[in-house]
Image (cartoon, rainbow, N blue to C red):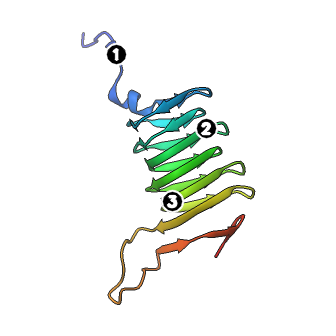
Amino acid sequence: MFSEKPKKGKLISDVINQQNTIAKGTTITGDIISDGDFRVEGTILGNVKTPGKVVLGKTGIINGTLHAANADIEGKFAGKLILTDTLSLKASAHVEGEVEVGKFAVEPGATFNASCMMKGAHKGTDINGSLKPSQTNGTVTKKGEFA
């Protein structure tokens, strides 16, 4: 009595939950803005912006600015990396440039030649102008060691 035929078409939540893939051998030059997650095995020469997660595979290369919530990097990244949550560098990762993250995980063997700013839940300085405990700056001097 109250049954309806299923609607043809995708729900907005289905589209958002899908992952965009840039395949090996593909080069994209320009800016990419998406609500979905990304897996990059090819090359992006430009900027990527998503509220989701970006996985840069072993054959993946991004040269530009990446704005996302999370990123897992196995390939090569050069440019500015701005993440609201976690950056995870796998052993094969190679990162150069500027990095701003909330959390940072590095596997032994990863190459990290970048300035890094880690931002916690509280931003800014205290009354005396000092950095709050949750906001730190770090530089990797050797694989897996901070100065």
- The residue where tag 1 is placed is 9
Q: Are marks 3 and 2 in contact (CB under 8 Å)?
A: no
Mark 2 closeness class: few <14, some 14–19, many ≥20 residues within 10 Å:
many
- In space, the residues marked 2 and 1 are separated at their CA atoms by 32 Å
Q: Name the kind of residue labelled 3 in the image.
A: Val
- In space, the residues marked 1 and 3 are separated at their CA atoms by 39 Å
Question: 10 left or right of 113?
Answer: left
Question: 140 left or right of 97?
Answer: right
**If you read the primary sequence from the N terminus, does the residue marked by circle 3 or circle 2 appear first?**
2
Q: Nearer the viewer, mark 1 or mark 3?
A: 3
116 vs 29, nearest the viewer: 29
Q: Name the kind of residue labelled 2 in the image.
A: Gly
**If you read the primary sequence from the N terminus, does the residue marked by circle 2 or circle 1 appear first?**
1
Secondary structure of the residue carrying numbered label 1: loop
Taking 78 as reference, is 61 above or below it? above
Residue at 36% x, 20% y is: 10
Q: Are marks 2 and 1 in contact (CB under 8 Å)?
A: no
Residue at 44% x, 43% y is: 52
**If you read the primary sequence from the N terminus, does the residue marked by circle 1 or circle 3 appear first?**
1
> Where does residue 3 sit, x and y in percent of width and height?
28, 12
Secondary structure of the residue carrying numbered label 2: loop
- The residue where tag 2 is placed is 60
> Where does residue 115 sit, x and y in percent of width and height?
54, 65
- The residue where tag 3 is placed is 99
> Where does residue 65 sit, x and y in percent of width and height?
45, 48
Taking 16 as reference, is 85 above or below it? below
Q: Name the kind of residue labelled 1 in the image.
A: Gly
137 vs 135, nearest the viewer: 137
